[in-house]
Amino acid sequence: MKAGKQTTLCDEASVSGIGVHSGSPVTLTLHPADAGTGIVFLRTGLPGRADCEIRADVRAVTATEFATVLGDGDGPLCATAEHVLAALAGLGVDNAVVEVDGPEVPIMDGSAEAFVAAIDHAGVRSLEAPRRFLKVLKPVRVTQGRSVAEILPNSRGLRLEIDIEFDHPLIGRQRCALDVSPTNFRRELARARTFGFMRDVAKLWNQGYALGASFENTLVVSETRVLNADGLRYPDEFVRHKAMDAVGDLALAGLPLLATYRSVRGGHTLNHAILSALMADPTAWAVVEATAPVVAPPRRVRGHAEVATPAPAYAPDVS
């Protein structure tokens, strides 16, 4: 692919499964899109309503308690959007239409691996338009009880520094720090599964959640051990999944971020809060375009893909 150019898919690709919370069968199809489209969800099969498009944008989030839910003024349209968003952002796909024929993105095996495979099957190609980034200009911080999130300037790309802490002997405190690139996303994050505790199952069912959860799509933890027959995919799979979720949630900025994101004891709600706080401050960010040739030498960190040095295109209006 040409450096500094926007990308889309070469062809379409589909996956089918069930929603982890709804338990409903659903098919998701990824379609190519023109430059400047961004990531758009196309919700089909709506009872009594025409098909509806909604842009993957932080302002379209209607709920974050157990998953990231996108919707409009008439209500939620697509739940559990974070894993497919993470795969698209993690592999550097700028423009795509995500068609979903049910209320929830299929959970597949609980990770982003199936969506990565679908993107690989479709292929990724460059477009003629220059790639645009959302560049963080100053630190923004959000605190929710003991949970803290901070987003900081980082002109080289997106870096994650994610810390979790659970009062459980198998998890405790874990940390994941990496620069997000297609190579690192595939190797370090894509296969990390969503997880849950057996002690919470009855409560979730009574609230109408986790109706499609099973050992095939959720890493299930008892008081003393992991109950899945295949065990853990990574020794620290729990924090890696939280980092993968963060890639998806931060994709709702609408453009790839030039930022370092730090999160302590976070999740979807905190991810949404920091992104909302960033976007609410027009002095904290600017949209920039990638330029070629690269002005400054790129940096490689543990396989981090080269990122062209961006040059300012325009900044948000400031009154």
Image (cartoon, rainbow, N blue to C red):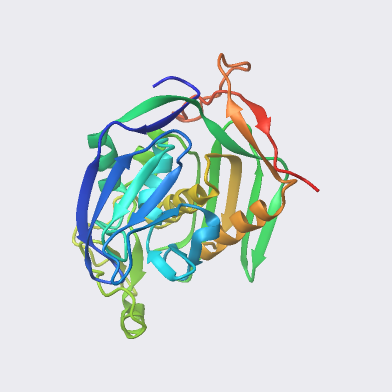
Q: Compared with residue 211, is residue 67 higher up or lower down, i.e. above or below?
A: above
Residue 66 shows in the view: no
- Name the quadrant containing residue 273: bottom right
Q: Residue at x 29, y 58 (%)?
A: 110
Q: How many marks?
A: 0
Identified at 28% across, 71% down, the residue is 47
State the image coordinates of residue 229 (x, y, percent, origin top left).
18, 61
Q: Is residue 110 left or right of residue 91?
A: left
Residue in the foreground of this view, choosing between 306 and 43: 43
Q: In the drawing, does residue 193 fall left or right of residue 181? A: left
Percent x, y of residue 189:
38, 46
The residue positioned farthest toward the right in the image shown: 319
Q: Position of residue 97 (x, y in %)?
A: 35, 45
Question: Image check: 279 left or right of 189?
Answer: right
Which of the two residues, 94 or 173, is positioned nearer the viewer here?
94
Residue at point 55% right, 40% down? 159
In the image, residue 175 sits, relative to residue 217, either above or below, namely above
* Whether residue 233 can be seen here: yes
Quadrant placement of the N terminus: top left
Classify 24 as above or below 32.
below
Residue 318 x/y as whole percent: 77, 46
Q: Is residue 165 above or below residue 55?
A: below
**Closer to the camera, 129 or 234?**
129
Farthest-out residue, top? 293
Residue 75 location, quadrant: bottom left
